[in-house]
Image (tube, rainbow, N blue to C red):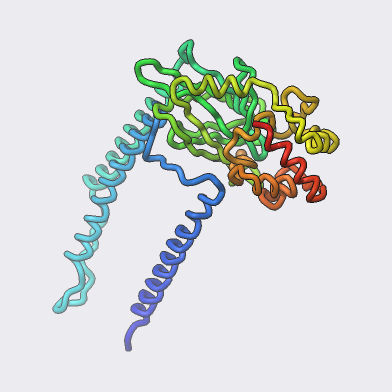
Amino acid sequence: MKPPLPFAIRSSRAWFTRALFLFVAFALKAAPAFADDAGGVTNIFKPNGTPARAIFSYTVLVLAICAVIFIIVVGLLVYTATRFRRRSGDDGHEPPQVYGSNQIELAWTVLPIIIVFVLGLVTARTIVEIQDATPPPKALQVTVVGHQWWWEIRYPELGIVTANELHVPVSDKAQPQPTFLKLESADVAHSFWVPQLAGKTDLVPNRDNLMWIDPMTPGTYLGNCAEYCGTQHARMLIRVIVHAPGEFEQWAAAQQRDAASDPQVKAGRDLFFSTSCVNCHTIKGTEAQGKFGPDLTHLMNRETLGSGAALNAPDTLRNWVRNPQRLKEGCYMPDMQITDEEVEQIVRYLRTLN
Ligand code: CUA
């Protein structure tokens, strides 16, 4: 009678194929979903700036060591399985059972200890290299405050407050102009992560953490909150906009101005100030001084809404004002229960805040 073993193998192989298929299908389906959130996909293998490059070199070292171990282990496995496979003409007896070998046991104890020790030293060196940097006098100082689920961004020396999009000047090797970030939290633990610029650093309540970036190429760098912080953790995205030389100063000067006050949108403006919008949002130069939500003074300068939940376009802004819960369920901006006409007026006002 045939043993049932081959059937078990066949069916487990079928399960494996099915699981692999499901995984690939999920990955393919999930990839465009990330892009939908106006977040795009970022890349840890394209570092830009000193901290990210240090982490990248370390990653390559770890991957290389792991690859060598993988090749040796799989090679030995394949060799053993082929060399000692069952052959026709075998006598069917159990082969000699060998227990214990001091040399081999010593080798597979000492080698991993050396590898772990080397990796530990390199890790410590990388961390110290990044954390011990002292800010040069030209360094830009920024405070980032994590909120459920958005980022407050303050430039204390420049008197600017904005949200979700961190603007910094480009740095270069000859004249480094890094940005030093002081990280705080208004509620729970978050984590600031822009993979192309630096590693993750947590934002912890009642504690200031520090990190720095020195991007060498102008452009937009995507990142996200990397510490589960509640329902909308996934829509707590961040963008870092790195300005070419001279452009950062222009951006900062525009941000320092009070909000635009266009008489043509007076109806929407009055509506904004008569609803509870003012309790949560600040609009510089007006009586709106709320601190609970993002500063809206230069809202139209931002590329996204709801901390990267959607691109900042007229109809997404309209949907957002009508009911933020549809785009970002559970966020702390409530459905204001206002009419379509009122939504339209408020949006017309908001669209003048450039
Ligand atoms: Cu903030 Cu996750």
In the image, residue 328 lies at what x, y percent? 67, 48
Please state which of residues 209 and 275 is positioned toward the viewer in this rendering. Answer: 275
In the image, residue 57 lies at what x, y percent? 33, 33
Task: Give the left or right position of residue 270, taking residue 150 as reference.
Answer: right
User: Furthest-left residue in view?
Assistant: 89
In the image, residue 168 lies at what x, y percent? 51, 25
Name the residue: 47% across, 29% down: 242
Name the residue: 19% across, 65% down: 82
Quadrant (top left, top right, bottom left, bottom right) of the N terminus: bottom left
Please state which of residues 197 and 266 is positioned toward the viewer in this rendering. Answer: 266
Q: Quick check: can you spot residue 236? A: no
Q: Quick check: can you spot residue 67? A: yes
Please state which of residues 212 and 214 is positioned toward the viewer in this rendering. Answer: 214
Name the residue: 70% across, 45% down: 331
Task: Give the left or right position of residue 32, taking residue 234 as reference.
Answer: left
User: Furthest-top residue in view?
Assistant: 137
Task: Give the left or right position of residue 163, taking residue 9 as reference.
Answer: right
Query: Eyeballing the image, is 342 above or below 82?
Result: above
Name the residue: 39% across, 26% down: 216
Q: How many marks?
A: 0
User: Furthest-front residue in view?
Assistant: 264
Q: Quadrant of residue 81?
A: bottom left
Query: Eyeballing the image, is 3 above or below 333?
Result: below
